[in-house]
Image: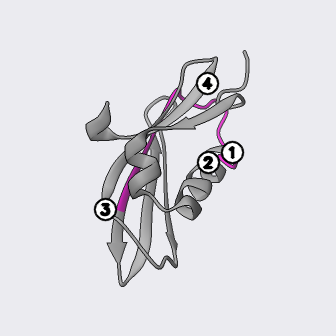
């Protein structure tokens, strides 16, 4: 089985306009650094603000995975982001863009 998310990365207009580039890079790195037997084709990120910092809850359904991250950000945001791998490319988008 081919490794997921090891292909061209794209983001929607909403991501490029509203999500700071540093946060985009961090989300891709969180996918790359997952310690799981298998990555689901759908990665889910719940972003919120906690004490002025960016809080990210990274999840996948199968196999079940959930990890929380907190980091400094000059512009933390709130939202739900999907990263979908369709084997030829991976796309990052806000849930409402799906």
* Nearest to N terminus: mark 3 or mark 4: 3
Residue under label 3, please give it. Answer: 78
* Nearest to N terminus: mark 1 or mark 4: 1
Q: Position of residue 59 (x, y in %)?
A: 45, 45
Q: What's the CA distance linking mark 2 and mark 1?
A: 6 Å
Which mark is on residue 28?
A: 2
* Nearest to N terminus: mark 4 or mark 2: 2
Residue closest to the eye, 21 or 42: 21
Residue closest to the eye, 34 or 10: 10
Q: Is residue 40 above or below residue 66?
A: above
Q: What's the CA distance linking mark 1 and mark 3?
A: 22 Å
Q: Do callouts 4 and 2 mark residues in contact (Cβ within 8 Å)?
A: no
Residue ranking furthest to the left: 96
Q: Is residue 36 left or right of residue 15?
A: right
Q: What's the CA distance linking mark 4 and mark 2?
A: 13 Å
Secondary structure beneath dot 3 equals: loop
Q: Position of residue 90 (x, y in %)?
A: 57, 30
Q: Residues within 10 Å of mark 3 (few under 14, many from 20)?
A: few
Name which residue lies at 61% across and 45% down: 31
Q: Residues within 10 Å of mark 2 (few under 14, many from 20)?
A: some
Q: What's the CA distance linking mark 3 and mark 4?
A: 26 Å
């Amino acid at each position: 089985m081919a490794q997921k998310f090891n292909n061209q990365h794209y983001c929607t207009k909403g991501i490029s306009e509203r999500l700071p580039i540093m946060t985009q890079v961090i989300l891709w790195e969180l996918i790359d650094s997952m310690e799981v037997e298998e990555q689901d084709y759908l990665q889910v990120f719940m972003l919120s603000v906690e004490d002025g910092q960016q809080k990210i809850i990274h999840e996948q359904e199968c196999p079940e995975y959930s990890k929380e991250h907190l980091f400094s950000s000059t512009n933390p945001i709130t939202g739900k982001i999907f990263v979908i791998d369709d084997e030829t490319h991976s796309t990052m988008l806000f849930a409402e863009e799906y």
